[in-house]
């Protein structure tokens, strides 16, 4: 419960990898089993789009997001990018062949419409902001620090054409293999470069006092450049002169695209602009959207798609005169969620935001809470009776499943973080400065209890009228066995913030927080730290499905799961980079998680029992040679299921450093050689995913 208070590593294309692997537990809560129920197709920022045919388009964005449409933008599928860095540019030369670029030198390539994305070797750690291909093989990528990369073989090799003394290149566009333009910023002023020989030489122009964000060439001699403070520059003499064009906008213009030489659209922070005379004049397009727009792409003179912040996707079919919203769902930060049964659930959030469902999340409806204060916790007893708490001592109660809410008197002005009822009468609420309130009459009266701490209390669980656990800031875990007459502080060996707690029965439970997952098997008397393989960070909420199965959610869309009482953990793909603040179960096999920007996730598949990998049952590091490694190491691995094989290099904290295998391989045994020269000294792991098989193998780098 939340209180309201790669890098790219140059890996040889001819590498091998042996995972004579450490056997790791496999569950069905893996890739593809978490489904976004609100904010379709994503709540994450979308930074770029390329609509290449009447039906096919690809959009990219935050935290490795790649979306694909095959029906002109009506529906979208999230593709596996195998990277976690932000992606800023995308360019397809046909419906199957495309390239994506992003942070930390990321370059991804597909030749099958995104069914597989292969990471290419850029030999750069720059922020790569834009990509332009003039044919299937010939392309240019630009980024910060004056980075310019050029390929003539579809990205098999990238040659460095970088220019020193430049702060940032934001955009590149080639009209053919030889003629191209780059725009960006240097020394807080706009910069324009042009080449007529495929990048062998570049001519510099600096006709803008404002940073330039994007450029589009309508012909070898004509181009439009846009940027900050509504800047629009136009050339018709191959860049010899650039003329300022009034935009009637003072906002940050992000992207421009033309279809033909007359019709063009600009998008940015303040909406959309349109021209029908080749950019000589522009008009503001009236749209009723609050989001910022980052990219626009037209497939013909009439049909275009624009994308932007909060996952917004809009479409025009009349050349940009009118736009319709294609993305769906309501926006608002959600803090907690509760289900009374498999069908009836309530999610609550900031600004009095309430969503309800009566069909297991198939649809979510906005309800009027009667307040604009932040709502932080919800307790749902049955399909009618629910209680929620929030800022300034707010307690609201519903007896009709969340449609109508009435205010209860808490007697405090502190922000309340969570509430827990064991039946319609007995409940408890906790909040700031150690606040604990207890009721035995359904919230008609609340009695303060002495917690003896001043830390903010974040989450609470009651086992019965006498026993319960509270967690909070500064490593606080409190325990009572006498109805709260005395709350005993339990020593857990950390002062870290504890944000969530869950019990599967009166003895077995889990508490989570900043860099910590704790487990108890004696009703909270003692707690033992857990060490999941996945990256440590802010864990906000936890759900114990049964004594062996636990799921934890947190910042940046992280979800980790154990099937064996915490002995091993698996990082699950949430499909979002949003902060996940709350989680609950609806029965033994359904999980729901909520977070920022209206994110609601549902785990649609129940975990199955632990199964063993039938191949490579013994750890055999003798195949890893040399180990430790100083320059390269050879590994072997086996593909045992007819699914894509993905192998990541992760550090000791579980942070993905790079993806070294990402392809469909026939069942069998393989070898790869991995270049480790760019890794610092330390312990690393190879992490393999092949269908429902998951495994890791440890190796060391010594300098």
Image: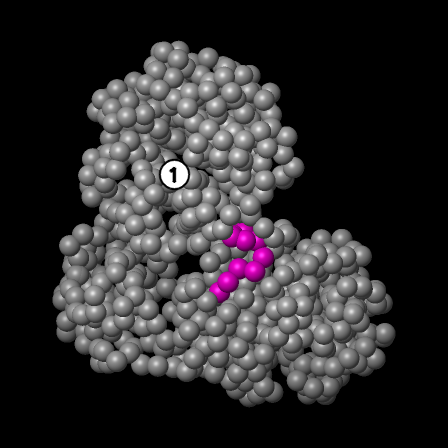
Q: What kind of colouring is applied to the model shown? A: one colour
606 vs 316, nearest the viewer: 316
Q: Which quadrant does the N terminus fall into?
A: bottom right
Instruction: Please say whether residue 674 is one of the residues in the magenta stretch.
Output: no
Q: Is residue 144 left or right of residue 370?
A: left
Q: Is residue 193 left or right of residue 43?
A: left
Residue at the spot of label 1 = 52
| Residue 396: quadrant of the picture | bottom right
| Residue 609: quadrant of the picture | bottom left
Count of marks overlaid on the render: 1
Tell me: residue 30, above or below residue 329: below
Tell me: residue 73, above or below residue 680: above
Q: Is residue 435 left or right of residue 632?
A: right
Give the residue drawn at x 38%, y 69%: 533
11 vs 698, nearest the viewer: 11
Where residue 676 sits in the image (x, y, percent)? 21, 56
Where residue 403 sits in the image (x, y, percent)? 77, 64
527 vs 261, nearest the viewer: 261
Give the residue drawn at x 73%, y 62%: 390
Q: Which quadrant does the C terminus fall into?
A: bottom left
Can residue 539 be seen here?
no
| Residue 693: quadrant of the picture | bottom left
Give the residue drawn at x 21%, y 66%: 666
User: Judging from the image, what secondary structure is the residue with disc 1 in?
Assistant: loop
Q: Badge 1, how many Cα within 10 Å: few under 14, some, many 20+?
A: many
Where residue 468 sits in the image (x, y, percent)? 66, 82
Give the residue drawn at x 38%, y 38%: 52
Can residue 347 be seen here?
yes
Tell me: residue 272, above or below residue 621: above
Tell me: residue 455, above or below residue 427: above
Where residue 247 sits in the image (x, y, percent)? 56, 20
Residue numbers of the magenta segment: 34-43
């Amino acid at each position: 419960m939340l209180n309201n208070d790669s890098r790219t590593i140059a890996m040889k294309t001819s590498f091998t990898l042996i995972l004579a692997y450490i056997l790791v537990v496999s569950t069905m809560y893996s890739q593809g089993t978490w489904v976004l129920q609100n904010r379709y197709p994503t709540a994450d920022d979308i930074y770029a789009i390329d609509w290449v045919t009447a039906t096919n388009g690809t959009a990219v964005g935050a935290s490795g997001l790649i979306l694909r449409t095959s029906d002109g933008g009506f529906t979208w599928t999230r593709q596996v990018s195998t990277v976690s860095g932000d992606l800023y540019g995308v360019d397809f030369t046909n419906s199957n062949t495309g390239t994506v670029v992003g942070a930390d030198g990321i370059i991804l390539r597909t030749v099958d419409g995104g069914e597989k994305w292969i990471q290419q070797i850029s030999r750069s750690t720059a922020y790569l902001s834009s990509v332009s291909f003039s044919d299937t093989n010939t392309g240019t990528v630009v980024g910060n620090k004056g980075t310019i990369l050029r390929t003539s073989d579809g990205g098999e090799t990238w040659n460095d054409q970088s220019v020193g003394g430049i702060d940032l290149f934001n955009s590149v566009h080639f009209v053919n293999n030889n003629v191209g333009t780059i725009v960006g910023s240097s020394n807080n002023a706009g910069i324009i470069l042009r080449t007529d020989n495929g990048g062998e030489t570049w001519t510099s122009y600096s006709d803008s006092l404002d940073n330039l964000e994007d450029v589009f060439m309508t012909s070898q001699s004509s181009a439009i450049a846009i940027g900050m403070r509504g800047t629009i520059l136009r050339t018709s003499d191959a860049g010899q002169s650039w003329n300022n064009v009034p935009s009637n906008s003072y906002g940050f213009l992000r992207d421009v695209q033309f279809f033909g030489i007359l019709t063009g659209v600009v998008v940015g922070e303040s909406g959309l602009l349109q021209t029908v005379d080749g950019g000589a004049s522009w008009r503001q397009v009236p749209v009723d959207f609050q989001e910022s727009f980052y990219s626009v792409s037209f497939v013909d003179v009439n049909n275009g798609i624009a994308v932007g912040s909060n996952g917004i996707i809009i479409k025009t079919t009349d050349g940009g005169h009118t736009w319709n919203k294609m993305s769906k769902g309501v926006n608002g930060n959600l803090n907690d969620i509760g289900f009374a049964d498999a069908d009836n659930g309530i999610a609550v959030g900031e600004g009095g935001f309430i969503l309800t469902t009566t069909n297991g999340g198939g649809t979510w409806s906005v309800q009027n809470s009667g307040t604009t204060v932040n709502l932080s916790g919800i307790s749902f007893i049955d399909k009618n009776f629910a209680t929620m708490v929030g800022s300034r001592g707010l307690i609201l109660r519903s007896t009709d499943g969340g449609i109508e809410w009435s205010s209860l008197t808490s007697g405090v002005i502190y922000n309340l973080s969570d509430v827990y009822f064991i039946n319609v009468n007995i409940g408890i609420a906790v909040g700031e400065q150690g606040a604990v309130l207890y009721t035995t009459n359904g919230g008609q009266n609340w009695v303060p209890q002495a917690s003896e701490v001043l830390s903010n209390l974040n989450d609470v669980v009651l086992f019965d009228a006498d026993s319960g656990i509270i967690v909070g800031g500064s490593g606080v875990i409190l325990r009572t066995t006498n109805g709260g007459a005395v709350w005993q502080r339990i020593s857990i060996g950390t002062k870290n913030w504890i944000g969530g707690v869950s019990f599967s029965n009166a003895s077995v439970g889990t508490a989570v927080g900043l860099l910590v997952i704790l487990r108890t098997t004696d009703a909270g008397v003692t707690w033992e730290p857990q060490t999941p393989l996945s990256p440590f960070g802010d864990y906000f909420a936890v759900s114990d499905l049964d004594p062996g199965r636990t799921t934890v959610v947190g910042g940046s869309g992280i979800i980790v799961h154990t099937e064996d009482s915490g002995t091993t953990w698996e990082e699950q793909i949430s499909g979002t980079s949003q902060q996940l603040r709350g989680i609950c179960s609806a029965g033994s096999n359904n999980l729901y998680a909520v977070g920022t920007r209206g994110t609601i996730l549902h785990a649609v598949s129940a975990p199955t029992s632990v199964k063993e990998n039938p191949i490579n049952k013994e750890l055999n590091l003798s195949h890893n040679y040399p180990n430790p490694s100083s320059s390269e190491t050879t590994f072997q691995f086996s593909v045992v299921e007819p699914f894509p094989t993905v192998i990541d290099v992760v550090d000791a904290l579980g942070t993905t450093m790079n993806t070294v295998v990402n392809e469909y391989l026939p069942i069998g045994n393989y070898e790869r050689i991995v270049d480790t020269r760019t890794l610092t000294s330390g312990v690393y792991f190879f992490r393999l995913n092949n269908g429902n098989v998951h495994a890791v193998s440890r190796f060391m780098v010594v300098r």
